[in-house]
Image (cartoon, rainbow, N blue to C red):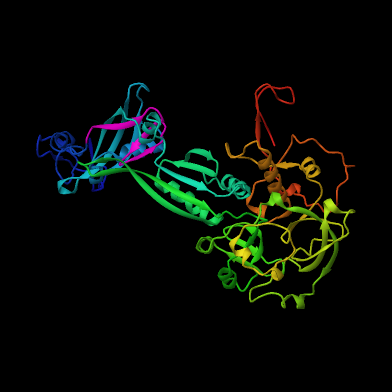
């Protein structure tokens, strides 16, 4: 302990005074007392505890930061110093000058910190004192580790469901979750027949995922909670929270029949529409007029409708003739809504590819794919005239107002050839994909949609497939087949094991 004189010395021959307690000659100071006498009378650290308990979880190696936060801090680190100083009571009453760790045995379960503080006593004298605070480490299991040991790893769950046998929206959602790392706080992911289950240790993490899903795909959510335990003395309730997220059962390239009231509210659009895009909204287009509309999840669940057929039931047609409808004539067919500028309305004559050469009968239809179709192209469509579809809204439409064929999408080359020439791939979440013929076919269709729609793959990470077998360039392929350029592909980094260096040397190598 020492004091700091508040008055600067006048010169080298400054006179001395006697201590008022013991009479020893000292330099003048406001208290007129020597250091030894001040030490016996004043203790700045009297109200500061010298022994403090520090809780440590040996399973996850984290320290308790009161009241209920667990932090990772290494020995003699700045984070551990801040945590130790926070636990010292009455430290704010004095001025902290310095703090440093004193080395202790790592297995001693003791931490020692040397503190230097300053304080003002009577008479304006500033006193400085150095002392040691000892921390005793007590083992305490954190809440996360306790749930793991008790096999109770989650506090909140999100149940994602889509009541449809189509998986295209779930494939797209899988890529969104991986690109934006929306499941980084998940303690577990479990696949179910109709979707996925996400488990979290806190309700806030589950709420973040629900908000993310709301901004990406059309959904509606409903929450519930279940009482697990109740401490009557402290009035503490332990709940488990469950959020059910229902995805709109409509996917891209579906043909739908809108309710009359809903079609009228969307600007008088036709009831028979094609879903050409699914984002946080449903994007519909009338193939007879080119008029498009956007519908949110609230509007859909208020007036729900289902898809007339699944994409796998579409029939391949061959284009016999195409006549583009001029722009000033398109408005005659459309209602009060907006007409798409990306699509061109055209009169198309088609015949089934399976009957080509055997039957010369052609079917006339009006399509929004005039900007893509040419004579001889293959296009997927739905024979609405000769089909037997059980839909309450479709039955009320007069037969003269129903189109004979509804064209959905153009076919760009053979599927097997496109799969062989595909030089990219996607990453997957565990448990979502099943090795079934129907899902494999639908997944291949989803990959084709990514190649054909640049807006769709904007939220998808596409990786180079270095293991893909190179296809001979002499393979016949149409020049208009859409592809993903190398500039849009990402390089996946992998670590080569020790001893497998391509140069023959030792050590790890990073491949891109």
Q: Residue at point 55% right, 41% down?
A: 193
Q: Residue at point 85% right, 51% down?
A: 478
Residue 10 as seen in the image, left or right of residue 255: left
Residue 450 as seen in the image, left or right of residue 126: right
Seen in the picture, residue 423 relative to 111 is either above or below; the reply is: below
Q: Residue at point 57% right, 58% down?
A: 280
Closer to the camera in the image, 434 or 100? 434
- x then y, percent, for residue 317: 80, 56
- x then y, percent, for residue 365: 77, 65
Q: Residue 54 in magenta?
A: yes
Q: Residue 466 in magenta?
A: no
Quadrant the C terminus occupies: top right
Residue 179 as seen in the image, left or right of residue 328: left
**Residue 364 sits in which quadrant?**
bottom right
**Residue 54 sits in which quadrant?**
top left
**Residue 260 sits in which quadrant?**
bottom right
Residue 109 as seen in the image, left or right of residue 394: left
Q: Is residue 75 visible?
A: no
Q: Is residue 279 visible?
A: yes
Closer to the camera in the image, 438 or 461? 438
- Which stretch appears magenta? 49-74
């Amino acid at each position: 302990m020492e004091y700091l004189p508040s008055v600067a010395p006048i010169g080298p021959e400054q006179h001395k005074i006697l201590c008022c307690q013991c009479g020893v000659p000292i330099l003048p100071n406001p208290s007129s007392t020597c250091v030894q006498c001040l030490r016996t009378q004043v203790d700045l650290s009297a109200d500061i505890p010298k022994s403090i308990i520090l809780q440590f979880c040996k399973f996850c190696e984290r320290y308790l930061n009161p009241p209920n936060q667990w932090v990772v801090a290494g020995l003699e680190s700045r984070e551990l110093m801040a945590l130790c100083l926070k636990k010292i009571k009455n430290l704010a009453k004095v001025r902290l000058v310095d703090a440093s760790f004193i080395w202790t045995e790592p297995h001693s379960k003791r931490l020692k910190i040397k503190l230097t503080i300053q304080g003002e006593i009577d008479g304006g004298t500033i006193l400085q004192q150095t002392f040691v605070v000892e921390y005793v480490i007590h083992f305490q299991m954190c809440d996360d580790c306790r749930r793991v040991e008790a096999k109770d790893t989650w506090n909140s769950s999100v149940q994602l469901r889509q009541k449809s046998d189509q998986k295209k929206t779930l494939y797209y959602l899988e890529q969104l979750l991986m690109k934006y790392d929306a499941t980084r706080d998940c303690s577990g992911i479990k696949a179910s027949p109709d979707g996925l289950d996400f488990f979290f240790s806190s309700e806030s993490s589950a709420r973040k995922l629900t908000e993310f899903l709301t901004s990406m795909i059309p959904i509606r959510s409903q929450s519930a909670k279940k009482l697990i335990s109740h401490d009557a003395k402290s009035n503490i309730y332990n709940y488990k929270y469950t959020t059910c997220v229902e995805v709109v059962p409509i996917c891209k390239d579906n043909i739908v029949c809108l309710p009359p009231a809903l079609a009228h509210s969307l600007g008088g659009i036709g009831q028979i529409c094609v879903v050409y895009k699914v984002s946080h909204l449903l994007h519909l287009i009338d193939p007879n007029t080119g008029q498009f509309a956007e519908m949110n999840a609230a509007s859909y669940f208020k007036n729900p409708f289902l898809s007339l057929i699944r994409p796998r039931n579409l029939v391949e047609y061959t284009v016999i003739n195409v006549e583009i409808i001029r722009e000033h004539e398109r408005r005659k067919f459309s209602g009060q809504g907006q007409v798409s500028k990306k699509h061109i309305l055209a009169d198309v004559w088609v015949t089934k590819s399976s009957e080509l050469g055997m039957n010369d009968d052609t079917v006339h239809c009006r399509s929004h794919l005039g900007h893509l179709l040419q004579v001889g192209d293959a296009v997927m469509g739905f024979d609405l005239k000769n089909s037997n579809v059980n839909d309450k809204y479709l039955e009320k439409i007069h037969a003269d107002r129903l189109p004979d064929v509804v064209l959905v999408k153009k076919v760009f080359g053979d599927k097997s050839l496109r799969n062989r020439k595909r030089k990219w791939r996607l990453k997957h979440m565990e448990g979502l994909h099943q090795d079934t013929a129907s899902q494999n076919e639908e997944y291949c269709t989803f990959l084709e949609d990514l190649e054909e729609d640049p807006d769709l793959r904007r939220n998808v990470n596409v990786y180079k497939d270095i293991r893909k077998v190179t296809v001979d360039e002499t393979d016949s392929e149409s020049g208009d087949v859409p592809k993903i350029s190398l500039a849009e592909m990402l390089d996946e980094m992998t670590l080569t094991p020790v001893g497998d260096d391509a140069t023959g040397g030792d050590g790890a190598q990073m491949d891109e």
